[in-house]
Image (tube, rainbow, N blue to C red):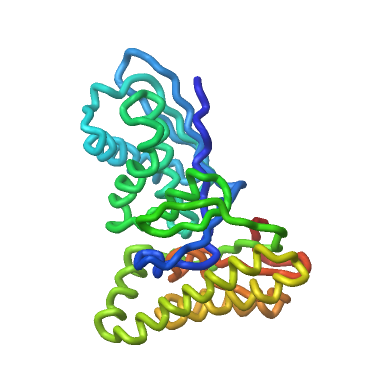
Amino acid sequence: MVNLEKSYGKWILCGEHSVLRGVPALAFPVNSHYLQVSYESGLEDLQVSCQGRSSDQIKLVIWGVLDKGLEIARAKRSDLKGYLKLDNSLPIGAGMGASAALCVAVGKFFSQIGLITKEKVYSFSKELENLFHGESSGVDIAVSLAGKGIKFIKDSGFKELEVNWRPKWFLSYSGQIGVTSECVQKVKTLKLNQPEKFHQIDSQMNESVVLAESALRLNEEEGLELLAKSMDLANNCFKQWGLIPESVQQHMDELKDLGALSVKPTGSGGGGYVVSLWETLPLNLTFETIPL
């Protein structure tokens, strides 16, 4: 059985939503959370097994994703042979890019068996992700594939991000599920109702990206305060979009009270995970955190 490359979860530092309109997004993998796919060739029709976190949910969608992949690759079910095993450690519906990781995993599998070329894995996986979100920017796909911090620009691709120090970032779960499609729709509605405000928020998110890039190129002493300012700007964009429910705000306030320099939603908002920046590592927290 061959272990294919891991498909990582992701978190976004800044650029969410605005990335669909050409604003860059800065995104990183969550190296501790990923989807591992193993494949063994054979002559029998493909058998699929799922294990690990949320395996029952993955079982419900995997054949739909495979069938959509076959449609994109202009192949048929009889082209799928052997045994495919998926081992997942990603939470579903939490803004960590589980759907993108699944699409990338299927893309790598299709490349492994010769249905698409390795060069096509990104565009294939991006098209596949439309099955989940309707309109994929491609950023989740890109970071899941790259496995490192990236600067992503829609329709222009992505490149590795220059990071000269290691910020003390943590993810923590807000306690509420965020639904990406609902969040995207909320932003679109703002565009219709308040176009001037809508464009102003995009400009502010772009400013957040510029500050974050500058902060990461500096050393920690010079960059920490600038990075916190960047995250505050991005967080304010989420507030103006109306994507921070009260329960999520309470969790963020708790992190600030415990000493976090800055806290913001990561991903589409509305719930899921938040990312916090610290000067010193938090101690005695009453909830789980994921070091980044």
Between 52 and 259, which is closer to the camera in this rendering? 259
> Observer-nearest residue: 232 or 175?
232
User: What residue sits 42% from the left and 34% below the top?
Assistant: 108
Q: Identify the residue shown where x is 49% and y is 41%.
A: 7
Look at 31% across and 45% down and name the residue there: 128
Compared across the picture, whether 23 is left or right of 63 comes to right
Q: In the rendering, at what x and y percent does residue 114 appear?
A: 34, 24
The image quarter containing residue 230 is: bottom right
* Residue 28, horizontal then vertical, whole percent: 56, 55
Please tell me whether residue 219 is drawn above or below residue 37 in the rendered image: below
Is 134 left or right of 281, judged from the image as shown?
Answer: left
Q: Is residue 69 left or right of residue 97?
A: left
Q: Position of residue 135 (x, y in %)?
A: 30, 58
Q: Classify 163 as above or below 278.
A: above
Task: Please give the name of the residue rendered at 49% of the width and 47% of the height, measured from the top-left corner.
Answer: 144
Note whether residue 60 is visible. Answer: no
Tell me the quadrant of the picture where the C terminus can be found: bottom right
* Numbered-mark total: 0
Up/down of 78 relative to 230, above or below? above
Q: Position of residue 290 (x, y in %)?
A: 64, 57
Residue 167 in which image quadrant: bottom right
Can I make out residue 45 in this image?
yes
Q: Residue furthest top?
A: 43
Residue 224 location, quadrant = bottom right
Q: Which of these two is toward me, 1 or 136?
A: 136
